[in-house]
């Protein structure tokens, strides 16, 4: 691991847009030589976020507009997700050369300290065979991972409370009759863990520092990262960015993913 410092930035409560663009700016900074960074952020208002390669029509844009829910596209993968102030998000960002080139190994290595933090905060979490942070058979942490230039980032969240109804309503379902089943399965397999967020944050700092062999230090954005943030704010709100890859975009097989191994099909149920 280059250097000896783990930069820790707690961005606090920020706008929905900044809850995305801040950690992307950090990724550009780490790619350019800033220290490995663990960041935390809480959105001040609810919104919907879509993975880079996914189709915008997976989101019910009419519902989101009526509810005043912004929709943003992130640079890492995954389908549309609902985010709000009852979720504390964390992002660990490292130079690509400091991470295993095997994706599953990298994700396992970078989620294991989060499991340690959950346990320190009183949640008996496990990293299961599908690389989900779970409590029993219920997912308690959504995560995403990707490479931005020469930095690798893994994002996750502490879900203190979860609005299953709204998380279902933001999805555009080709067969409307599946909505009730999506909601039922989401309630069954996605759980909140009302742990103390400060205890979780402090434990995460200690766990990531220990796992990476780095000394944690409170930090802030560099000048270059602030410049990148301004550019990202404009990019993430542009029509061209939100349009995404269009017809080249990916749609997962099997319909709506609830958690690893649990799907609700668009035309038939394919639940496991």
Image: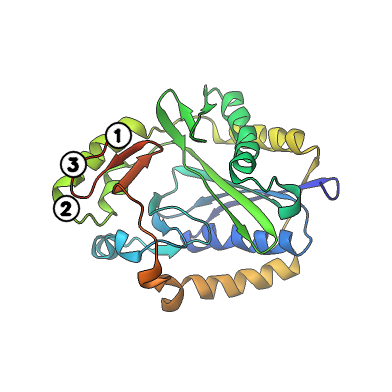
- Determine whether 25 is above or below 40 in the image: below
Residue 221 shows in the view: no
Q: Secondary structure at mark 2?
A: loop
Residue sitting at x 49%, y 63%: 17
Of tags 2 and 3, which is closer to the observer? 2
Q: How many marks?
A: 3
Specify the farthest residue to the left: 177
Among the two numbered marks 2 and 3 on one chain, the one whose residue lies closer to the N terminus? 2
**Residue occupying image coordinates x 47% and y 42%:** 142
Quadrant in the picture for residue 261: top left
Instruction: Tell me if residue 144 can be seen.
Output: yes
Dot 2 and dot 3 residues touching (CB under 8 Å) = no
Residue 174 in the image: state x and y as whole percent: 20, 56
Q: Position of residue 116 (x, y in %)?
A: 62, 28
**For residue 175, which numbered disc appears in the image?**
2
Q: Earlier in the sequence, mark 1 or mark 2?
A: 2
State the CA–CA distance, disc 3 to disc 1.
Answer: 11 Å
Q: Which residue is depicted at the point 25% across and 42% down? A: 182
For the residues labelled 1 and 2, the Cα–Cα distance comes to: 20 Å
Q: Which residue is mark 1?
A: 187
Secondary structure category for the residue under label 1: helix
Identify the residue position indicated by label 3 in the image: 180
């Amino acid at each position: 691991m280059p250097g000896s410092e783990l930069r820790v930035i707690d961005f606090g409560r920020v706008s929905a847009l900044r809850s995305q663009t801040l950690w992307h700016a950090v990724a550009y900074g780490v790619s350019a030589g800033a220290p490995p960074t663990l960041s935390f952020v809480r959105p001040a208002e609810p919104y919907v976020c879509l993975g880079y390669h996914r189709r915008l029509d997976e989101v019910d844009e009419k519902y989101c507009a009526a509810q005043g829910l912004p929709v943003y596209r992130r640079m890492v993968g995954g389908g549309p997700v609902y985010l709000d102030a009852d979720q504390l998000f964390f992002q660990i960002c490292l130079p690509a050369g400091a991470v295993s080139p095997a994706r599953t190994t990298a994700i396992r290595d970078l989620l294991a300290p989060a499991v340690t933090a959950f346990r320190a905060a009183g949640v008996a979490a496990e990293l299961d065979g599908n690389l989900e942070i779970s409590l029993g058979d219920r997912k308690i942490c959504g995560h995403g991972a990707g490479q931005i230039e020469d930095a690798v980032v893994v994002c996750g969240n502490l879900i203190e409370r979860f609005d299953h109804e709204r998380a279902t309503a933001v999805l555009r379902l080709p067969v409307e009759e599946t909505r009730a089943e999506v909601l039922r399965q989401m309630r069954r397999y996605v759980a909140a863990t009302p742990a103390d967020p400060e205890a979780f944050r402090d434990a995460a700092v200690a766990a990531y520092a220990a796992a990476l062999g780095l000394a944690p230090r409170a930090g802030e954005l560099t000048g270059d990262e602030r410049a990148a943030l301004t550019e990202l704010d404009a990019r993430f709100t542009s029509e061209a960015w939100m349009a995404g890859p269009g017809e080249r975009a990916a749609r997962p097989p099997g319909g709506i993913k609830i958690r690893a191994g649990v799907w609700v099909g668009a035309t038939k149920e394919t639940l496991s």
